[in-house]
Amino acid sequence: MMNDQQLLERIVCNPKVMAGKPVIQGTRLTVDYILNLLAHGATIHDILDEYEGLIAEDIQACLLFADTSWTRC
């Protein structure tokens, strides 16, 4: 199990990728996009099935990043 810091390291910001929006490392999937999928009823299992290479911790990292106390980018 990853700790909070390890999870947050999975979220990166690069001005050359998706205009600098926070993304899951190694992808072009933004945190906002993943949160939107969850908000519209997608399950973690649904997302993992749709996007090969993602792991459950990537989704967990997006949720943690969304907490306003974790300001990075």
Image (cartoon, grey):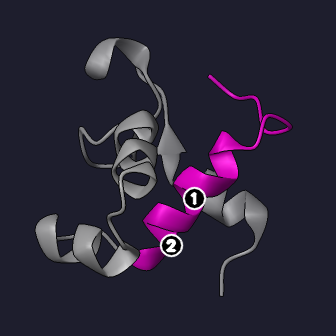
Residue sitting at the far right? 69
Q: Name the residue under label 1.
A: 61
Judge by depth and name the residue closer to the eye, 2 or 43: 43
Q: Do the residues under discs 2 and 1 have CB atoms within 8 angstroms?
A: yes
Q: Main secondary structure of the magenta part?
A: helix
Judge by depth and name the residue closer to the eye, 42 or 12: 42
Residue at 70 percent across and 28 percent down: it is: 72
**What's the magenta region?**
56-73
**Residue type at tag 1:** Ala
Residue 61 image position (x, y, % from top left): 57, 58
Residue 59 image position (x, y, % from top left): 46, 63
**Residue type at tag 2:** Glu
Does residue 63 show up magenta in the picture? yes
| Crowd band around label 1 with a 10 angstrom C-alpha radius: few (<14), some (14–19), many (20+) | many
Residue at 16 percent across and 64 percent down: it is: 51
Q: Distance between the residues labelled 2 and 1?
A: 6 Å
Residue 18 image position (x, y, % from top left): 28, 20
Residue sitting at the far front? 41
Location of residue 47 with respect to 45 vertically, above or below: above
Does residue 65 show up magenta in the picture? yes
Q: Which structural element holds mark 1? A: helix
Q: Can residue 39 be seen in this view?
A: yes
Q: Which mark is residue 57?
A: 2
Where the C terminus falls, by quadrant?
Answer: top right
- In which quarter of the view is residue 20 placed? top left
Location of residue 33 with respect to 10 vertically, above or below: above
Q: Which mark is residue 70?
A: none
- In which quarter of the view is residue 30 placed? top left
